[in-house]
Image (tube, rainbow, N blue to C red):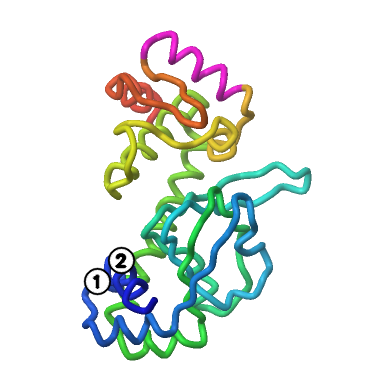
Amino acid sequence: MIPAVRDLLGQHFLLKHLAAAELDQLARMAITRLCRPNEAVFLKGDPGNSMMAVVHGRVRICSYSSEGREVILNVINPGEVFGEIALIDGGSRTADAFAMDATELVVLSRRDFLPFLERNPQVCIKLLEVLCERLRATSAQVEDFFFLDLRSRLAKRLLAAADHAANNGAGGDPGTVRLSQHMLASMIGTSREAVNKQLRAWEEAGLIALKRGAVKIINRQRLEEIVAEEAP
């Protein structure tokens, strides 16, 4: 089991520069966790005692209003880490995390990982880069909500999701975004009905093709133009 976990950790940009002995040390600290679809990985307010990496499957990071409305803050794909904020400061979880599919995780406990960070400051720097990237993404999400209309927010989200899948070597049909209409609505702060109406209009215009639980981008240039029309 340790060689498999070591190989997984060694592929991640946080850790790929480490020597084999250091990766072996981390692999011995790690445990694996299997989650069913829609199973809670952790909930907001839970103790932040670990950081996790997705081996396969997906995890959505989300929050809920007092009325029960879900807002999806991020989707964590294979090879990506999450839970790093609470891991560093020891505070409680700042959002909920749910497995979207049958998901396998590698879990590193705070008790084991913090001493490792002290011995490997280069990993600390990489972890700070992850935090900065998340902060920029959150700031952009807030700006989009205030400055872009629904059509532009939806186009931007589809393009970003397609780019992310391509850059991370996700399998499947190129240009296909594996997000349901409910999830897209939760990501851009609107209703599923509004998303469905816009997607249907784009499908009729030849910009996209709708699939079960997915959207295939046909005319990327036109979607980019829609975003540019509303960009501040």
Q: Residue at x 45, y 79 (%)?
A: 30
Where, quadrant-wise, is the C terminus in this rendering? top left
* Mark seen at residue 12: 2
The residue depicted at 48 percent of the width and 44 percent of the height is 141
How many C-alpha atoms fall within 10 Å of the one at disc 2: few (<14), some, or many (≥20)?
A: some
Q: Circle 2 sits in a helix, a strand or a loop, which is it?
A: loop
Q: Quadrant of residue 187?
A: top right
Task: Please provide the residue range marked out in magenta.
Answer: 194-206
Q: Is residue 176 magenta?
A: no
- Going 48% across and 65% down the picture, which residue do you hit? 105
**In x, y percent, where is residue 7?**
29, 71
Expressed as whole percent of the image width and height from the top left, the position of residue 102 reads 53, 52
Q: Which kind of residue does numbered mark 2 sit on?
A: His
* Looking at the image, residue 136 lies above or below residue 208: below
Residues 98 and 226: in front is 98
Do callouts 1 and 2 mark residues in contact (Cβ within 8 Å)? yes
> Which amino acid, mark 1?
Lys
Where residue 198 appears, as percent x and y from the top left, is: 52, 18
Q: Residue 16 — which label?
A: 1
